[in-house]
Image (cartoon, grey):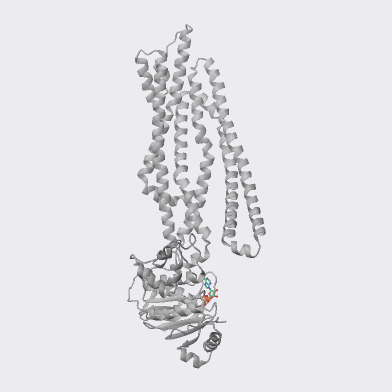
């Protein structure tokens, strides 16, 4: 429960709605409670009329109705003071009942309008809060949490918490006010009968407690097996091509059937328990009703007016729904508490990448210095860079070469501050990047990541993604031409309006890479950072792109990370990495003279190119 205290700030924000909601719950119950009293009164009246017809003369005094609510008392007083016939009194009481029911309905409507609507506002705010927090977290968080888990917190957990902020709160207030109103008037009317009627209540409370606990545990198991089932289905859909090519359809179906069977077993067991819950609830309530009728009848034989029995039966009836909803409400609160706990844990996660206390915004034109940088990935302990130093001047083109896992991409990650260096520093125009606001820093770097990601949108939107201004179609096409993908886009049925990403057409790996390059070119920052972004294109296309880039990159600073040599570009500096350390550094000519790893790769590549391949693997 304590975890749900995190929602108090929202309740405070929506305090007016909440207070009005509570008031409407009280008012709706206030009008609801009048019907047993009016019904009891009518029965008394009718009994009185029958007795009079039988020659038994008695007068129903106003005092006898003194235990009723003041509105009912007022009504009875008015009836008594006017000379109505019995049938007119019954009709008038019926009209009064109708008015009360309408008023109750009206306030119930307002109660839902305030409390349930408030819960929807809280849901909206909480989703935004979580989403905003996601955006601030660093790359490490995303590496250590599964997408499914993160999606669950925004969707499933928030909607469970909403069930607490709306329905659970509403039903709890409703339960409390109904019980208070009913017990108040029941005791006022006939205390001994009330005690008798309430006698099955302890058994009811114990039943609710025990059964609800078991239901809660079983629900958790059902939830877990549902999650396994969903993950299984999701993996089967995403990996369908691998499954088919390995002929594993039968096995996968076997796994799914196993999960599905487990889910079925758990849900059936939960349904059986729920099947006991509601009948036992009804049994207890029925017992109370029976007591009210039997014990009330005995009291009628001793002179009590029979209207009291009707009144009590109706009170018990009114208590039925709120009492039987106790278990359901309690389980809603327990689930919400577990979900809020998960949300709190997540919201308390802070990104180690912090904004500078004293931010500086130097001109970021490409003077970059890696000064003795070392870095170890926090959650795996893999040291990716060791004492790495490199100075890049404005306008220089730098090639970073290395075998897979040598630490090339880590350089890009550190420059963009997806991670912070452990030792050493990175300077941009003489300023430590930790002093530069994150947004400002990233705005000045056009980055093409190794893993291409296209959004479920059209190609144009994917290319001009992240631009603050509306892009001209001609500029988008220009970027696509530089990335050598313009013609292929034009060949698609809807050209630049073609939907891509999960919901759109499936592009080839190379096409996606080139759209990703066009996106970076479109951004046009002064520092260009390409991380192995031509791995999926053929050698001719690679040549075309590199040639185009030569022209585009003229006035930019560019760092190109790859494990192949681009002969079409003249690099000012070439760095060969091995195990996170600089193995060789210099210009093409210097490295060829050095006759080391670079020269070996170059010769290998040249030989391969002679056999009609433009590029070759580093290893
Ligand atoms: N997010 C990460 N968390 C933990 N370890 C990582 C992470 N990214 C990379 N590593 C590890 O750090 C080392 C350097 O990885 P990096 O991605 O920088 O190499 P790379 O030279 O770019 O390789 P490739 O050419 O295959 O992309 C590798 O051993 C890798 O396993």
Instruction: Name the residue at 54% across, 15% down.
Output: 301
Quarter of image, res 445: bottom left
Q: In this view, does 246 lie above or below 576?
A: above
Can you tell which quarter of the image residue 24 is in?
top left
Across and down, in percent, residue 44 comes to: 46, 17
Q: In this view, does 63 lie above or below 461?
A: above
- Of 96 and 563, the residue lying toward us: 563
The residue that appears at 57% across and 59% down in the rendered structure is 237
Nearest the camera: 391 or 497? 497
Quadrant (top left/top right/bottom left/bottom right) for the C terminus: bottom right
The residue sitting at 50% across, 70% down in the picture is 451
Q: In the rendered image of this protein, does residue 579 appear above or below residue 150? A: below
How far from the left and from the top, in percent, is residue 538? 51, 76
Observer-nearest residue: 391 or 587?
Answer: 587
Image-quadrant location for residue 41: top left
Residue sitting nearer the eye, 45 or 60: 45
Q: Where is residue 345 in the image (x, y as percent from the top left)?
A: 48, 58
Horizontal side, residue 80 vs residue 215: left or right: left
User: From where the camera sits, is residue 356 visible?
Assistant: no
- Would you place residue 604 above or below residue 526 in this image? below
> How far across and down, in percent of the image, does residue 21 sit?
39, 40
């Amino acid at each position: 429960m304590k975890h749900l205290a995190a929602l108090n700030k929202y309740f405070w924000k929506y305090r007016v709605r909440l207070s009005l909601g509570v008031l409407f719950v009280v008012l709706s119950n206030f009008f609801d409670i009048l019907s047993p009293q009016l019904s009891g009164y009518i029965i008394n009246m009718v009994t009185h009329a029958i007795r009079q017809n039988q020659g038994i003369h008695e007068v129903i005094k106003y005092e006898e109705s003194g235990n009723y609510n003041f509105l009912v008392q007022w009504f009875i007083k008015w009836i008594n003071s006017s000379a109505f016939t019995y049938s007119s009194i019954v009709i008038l009481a019926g009209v009064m009942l109708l008015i009360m029911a309408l008023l109750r309905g009206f306030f119930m409507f307002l109660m839902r309008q305030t409390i349930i609507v408030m819960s929807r506002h809280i849901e909206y705010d909480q989703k935004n809060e979580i989403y905003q927090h996601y955006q601030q977290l660093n790359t490490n968080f995303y590496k250590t949490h599964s997408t499914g888990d993160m999606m669950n917190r925004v969707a499933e957990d928030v909607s469970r918490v909403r069930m607490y902020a709306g329905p659970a709160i509403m039903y709890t207030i409703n339960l409390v006010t109904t019980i208070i109103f009913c017990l108040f008037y029941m005791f006022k009317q006939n205390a001994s009968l009330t005690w008798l009627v309430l006698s099955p209540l302890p058994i009811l409370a114990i039943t609710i407690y025990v059964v609800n606990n078991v239901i809660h545990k079983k629900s958790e198991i059902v939830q877990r097996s549902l999650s396994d089932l969903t993950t299984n289905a999701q993996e089967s859909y995403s990996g369908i091509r691998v499954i088919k090519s390995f002929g594993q359809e039968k096995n996968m179906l076997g796994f799914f059937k196993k999960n599905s069977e487990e889910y079925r077993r758990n849900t059936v067991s939960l349904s059986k328990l729920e099947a006991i819950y509601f009948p036992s609830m009804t049994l207890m309530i029925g017992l109370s009703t029976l007591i009210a009728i039997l014990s009330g009848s005995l009291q009628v034989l001793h002179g009590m007016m029979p209207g009291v029995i009707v009144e009590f039966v109706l009170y018990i009836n009114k208590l039925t729904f709120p009492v039987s909803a106790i278990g359901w409400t309690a389980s809603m609160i327990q689930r919400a508490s577990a979900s809020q706990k998960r949300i709190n844990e997540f919201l308390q996660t802070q990104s180690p990448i912090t904004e500078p206390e004293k931010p500086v915004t130097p001109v970021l034109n490409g003077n970059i210095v890696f000064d003795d940088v070392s870095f170890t990935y926090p959650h795996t302990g893999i040291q990716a860079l060791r004492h790495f130093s490199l100075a890049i001047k404005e306008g220089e083109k730098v090639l970073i070469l290395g075998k897979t896992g040598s630490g090339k991409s880590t350089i890009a990650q550190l420059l963009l501050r997806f991670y912070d260096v452990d030792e050493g520093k990175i300077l941009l125009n003489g300023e430590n990047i930790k002093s530069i606001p994150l947004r400002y820093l990233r705005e000045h770097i056009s980055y093409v990541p190794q893993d291409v990601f296209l959004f479920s949108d059209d190609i144009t939107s994917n290319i001009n993604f992240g631009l603050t201004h509306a892009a001209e179609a001609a500029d988008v096409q220009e970027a696509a031409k530089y990335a050598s993908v313009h013609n292929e886009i034009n060949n698609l049925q809807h050209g630049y309006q073609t939907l891509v990403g999960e919901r759109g057409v499936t592009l080839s790996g190379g096409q996606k890479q080139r759209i990703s390059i066009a996106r970076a070119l479109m951004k046009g920052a002064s520092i260009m950072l390409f991380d192995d972004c031509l791995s999926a294109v053929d050698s001719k296309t690679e040549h075309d792109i590199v040639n185009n880039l030569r022209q585009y990159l003229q006035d930019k600073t560019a760092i190109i990370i790859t494990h192949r040599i681009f002969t079409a570009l003249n690099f000012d500096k070439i760095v060969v990495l091995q195990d996170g350390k600089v193995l060789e550094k210099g210009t093409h000519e210097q490295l060829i003279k050095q006759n080391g790893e670079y020269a070996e790769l170059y010769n290998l590549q040249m030989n391969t190119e002679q056999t009609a391949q433009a590029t070759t693997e580093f290893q």
